């Protein structure tokens, strides 16, 4: 995927963070065939810059999502509860940095992310407290692991970040794994209004969809869970999964 963004000018991490850290933001997510990425990036030529660190433009991410035994995080998203959360340990593979991160819902559908460097100490406790999430961190345990490669763009006219995640793999502890070859997840992160990247995606026939790396992955790998929000995404965008998923998923309406 790095080759696709080779023609875009670079932006350094410090400048990207200063211009568009966007810890409180509106997220719009799209699933595209990987073969359609060149058309998207060509359309952003002259408007976007690509994050570059030490000559690299694509970076490995490894995230472990945590949930309660009752799956409060997953079910909060499945049932669209207003006070819902996600908790994860995010490992930036290329730099070796790790963060404990908690996401919650803010006003008007915004996403609020809080994080702290993670060294194994008290884990999620301080981030949960800062996020106002009333969950005992001792009850959280690993539920799903995701791995992917990310390219990050900055669209200056609307101060928007665009992330492109490829080579996504989902795995449950001690259970099956799914590799999503041939598809990428594109996410726009803005302060509110639609960006130039959103408008370009719409013009190319793509619409936002409720894909969640945690919830969609868990729905795919544990088909007995309530998953009405994500079944259409799995059926439409990942048809090849039908041969790899547990048979129960094919029977769901």
Image (tube, helix red, strand yellow):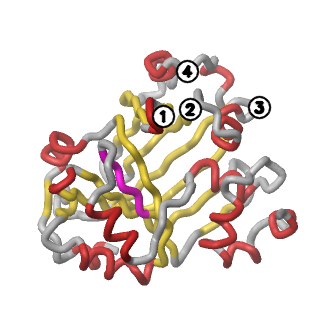
Instruction: State the image coordinates of residue 104 (x, y, percent, origin top left).
Output: 50, 31
Corner quadrant of residue 71: top right
For the question of whether residue 142 can be seen, the reply is no
Mark 4: few/some/many CA within 10 Å (<14, 14-19, 20+): some
Q: Can you tell which mark lies on residue 34?
A: none
Judging depth in this view, the residue of 129 and 186 nearest the camera is 186
Asked whether the beta carbons under mark 4 and mark 2 sit within 8 Å of each other, the answer is yes
Instruction: State which tag comes first along the sequence, 3 or 2.
Output: 3
| Cα distance between the residues tagged 4 and 3 | 16 Å
Which residue was labeled with disc 2?
A: 85
Sequence-first disc among 1 and 2: 2
Residue bearing the label numbered 3: 70
Q: Earlier in the sequence, mark 1 or mark 3?
A: 3
Q: Are marks 4 and 3 in contact (CB under 8 Å)?
A: no
Confirm or deny contact between disc 1 and disc 3 (CB under 8 A): no
Question: What's the residue at 20%, 76% (across, down)?
Answer: 6
Type of secondary structure dominating the magenta stretch: strand
Q: Which residue is mark 1?
A: 103
Task: Judge the density around disc 1: few (<14), some (14-19), many (≥20) Cα neighbours within 10 Å.
Answer: many
Magenta residues (range): 186-190
- What label does residue 133 carry, if any? 4
Q: CA distance from mark 1 to mark 4?
A: 10 Å
In what element is the residue under mark 1? Answer: strand
The N terminus lies in quadrant? bottom left
User: Disc 4 or 3, which lies upstream in sequence?
Assistant: 3
Residue 146 relative to residue 99: left or right: right
Of circles 3 and 2, the one toward us is 2
Lateral position of residue 66 relative to residue 251, left or right: left
In the depicted structure, whether residue 164 falls above or below residue 182: above
User: Is mark 1 in CB contact (under 8 Å) with mark 2?
Assistant: yes
């Amino acid at each position: 995927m790095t080759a696709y963004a080779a023609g875009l000018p670079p932006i350094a991490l410090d400048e990207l963070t200063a211009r568009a850290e966007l810890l409180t933001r509106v997220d719009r997510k799209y699933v595209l065939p990987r073969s359609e990425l060149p058309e998207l990036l060509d359309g952003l030529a002259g408007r976007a810059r690509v994050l570059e660190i030490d000559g690299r433009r694509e970076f490995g991410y490894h995230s472990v999502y945590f949930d309660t035994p009752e799956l409060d995080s997953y079910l909060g998203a499945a049932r669209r509860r207003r006070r819902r959360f996600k908790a994860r340990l995010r490992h930036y593979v290329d730099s070796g940095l790790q963060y404990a991160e908690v996401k919650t819902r803010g006003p008007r559908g915004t996403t609020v992310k809080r994080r702290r460097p993670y060294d194994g100490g008290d884990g999620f406790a301080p981030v949960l407290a800062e996020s106002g999430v009333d969950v005992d961190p001792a009850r959280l345990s690993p539920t799903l692991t995701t791995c992917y490669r990310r390219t990050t763009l900055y669209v200056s006219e609307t101060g928007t970040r665009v992330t492109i995640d490829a080579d996504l793999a989902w795995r449950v502890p001690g259970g099956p794994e799914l590799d999503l070859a041939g598809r990428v997840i594109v996410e726009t992160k803005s302060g509110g209004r639609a960006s130039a990247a959103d408008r370009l995606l719409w013009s190319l026939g793509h619409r936002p969809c409720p894909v969640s790396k945690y919830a969609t992955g868990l729905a795919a790998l544990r088909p007995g869970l309530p998953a009405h929000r994500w079944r259409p995404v799995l059926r439409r965008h990942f048809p090849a999964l039908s041969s790899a998923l547990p048979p129960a998923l094919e029977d769901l309406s």
